Amino acid sequence: MLVRILSRSLLALLAVFATSAHAQFFRTYLALDGSDANPCTLQQPCRLLPAALAAVAAGGEIWLLDAANYNTATVNITKSVTILAVPGVVGSVVATGGPAISIATAGVKVALRNLVIVPLPGTGGTSGVVMTLGAMLTVENCLIANLSGYGIVVSNPAEVRVVDTTIRGTSSIGVQVSGGAKAVITRAVVGDTGSVGLRAEGDVAGTTTTLDIIGSTVETSSHGVSAYSDNATGALKVSVSDSLIARNANQGVSVYSTAGAPVSVAVTNNRIVNNGTVGIYAQGEGVKVWASANTVSNNGSGLSNSGAIFETAGNNAVRNNFSSNTSGSITAVLME
């Protein structure tokens, strides 16, 4: 009888240990000397992100404890999670053979904090963060650099927040949102991109994509900020405020609608200077641009309109642009 009781007790204890070994934790940990055979606890950290993602519960956190690379292939995130490097640590996620991070699961909320996202040379890495499905993406205090594709691209109706982040040296676009995404970019520095620094694209029928840019710097790219729709019902709403848009090779702020979709852009209290062709450019039926309290100077030309509605509050400082300060129909409207 005693043996039977002890046997049952031992089996129960083994069952508890088995459950614990496969449990998912609110917080998992990665370290340079970790092992993916570990349970990803603080005492026994894992080494790479896929192991930590398997061990963390939905809505939990993954902490990177040491300066190191934490992946060998695209990190596919399929659950809500926060991934962060502890302060003072260079937590790197590298792009190899595709994007560094891919998010393609409906409803997930993903936050990335204090990460460095770069390509691993010679491995065919493309973009930084690619979201095609998901509910929310937050990128805070990150560096995204030197990629052959995009820095961040979101093509679905997700909430997007990019805060205190530097994106530089991408061959394509720094940040692009489309497909009904709703993005706010605050205190970002975006530069040296081969195409556009920050772009909202209306390419999906029946969607309204919004992009609000606040207190940011967009510089030394082919174009600075772009709102572009080529779908008749792909609407865009964009605002740019309290920002520096400087030394872009072509247009500082460019607004286009090629199929007549409503594209509304408000440009307020910015310095738009030293851009190669035009400070603020509007083109196409459906485009409405409102400009107030901006300094637009030393560009190829200042304000330019071709077939759009371009209104100003009459309080912009548009001076010393090289070919002209204004061209096309620019209408001053009294402030209400």
Image (spheres, grey):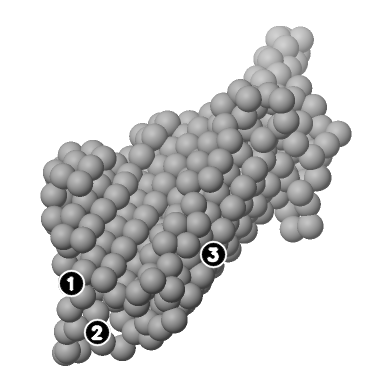
Label 2 neighbourhood size at 10 Å, few (<14), some (14-19), many (20+)? some
Crowd around label 3: few <14 · some 14–19 · many ≥20 (10 Å): many
Is 143 on the left-hand or right-hand side of 104?
Answer: right
Frontmost residue, 16 versus 236: 236
Judging by the rendered image, the residue that carries numbered circle 3 is 247
How many numbered circles does the render carry? 3
Q: Residue 296, percent across and down?
A: 41, 77
Mark 1 surroundings within 10 Å by alpha-carbon count, few (fewer than 14), some (14 through 19), many (20 or more): some
Compared with 177, 183 (above or below) is below
Above or below, 332 relative to 276: below
Is residue 154 among the parts visible in the rendering? yes
Residue at left offset 21%, top offset 75%: 330
Side of 58 where 168 appears, left or right: right
Q: Are marks 3 and 1 in contact (CB under 8 Å)?
A: no
Task: Pick the residue in front: 178 or 5.
Answer: 178
Q: Which amino acid does label 2 sit on?
A: Ala
Q: Can residue 128 be seen in this view?
A: no
Tell me the quarter of the picture where residue 263 sits: bottom left
Per the image, the residue denoted by label 1 is 329
The mark closer to the camera, 1 or 2, is 1
Report the residue that reaches farthest toward the front: 323
Q: Which element type, helix, strand or loop, lies under badge 3?
A: loop
Query: Which of pointers 3 and 2 lies earlier in the amino acid sequence?
Result: 3
Report the amino acid beneath label 1: Ser
Quadrant holding the N terminus: top right
Q: In which quarter of the image is the C terminus?
A: bottom left
Residue drawn where x is 49% and y is 52% of the image: 222
Q: Name the residue under label 2.
A: 313
Q: How far apart are marks 3 and 2 (CA)?
A: 25 Å
Residue nearest the observer in this picture, 48 or 322: 322
Q: Which amino acid does label 3 sit on?
A: Arg
Give me the residue at 48% from left, 46% from top. Answer: 195
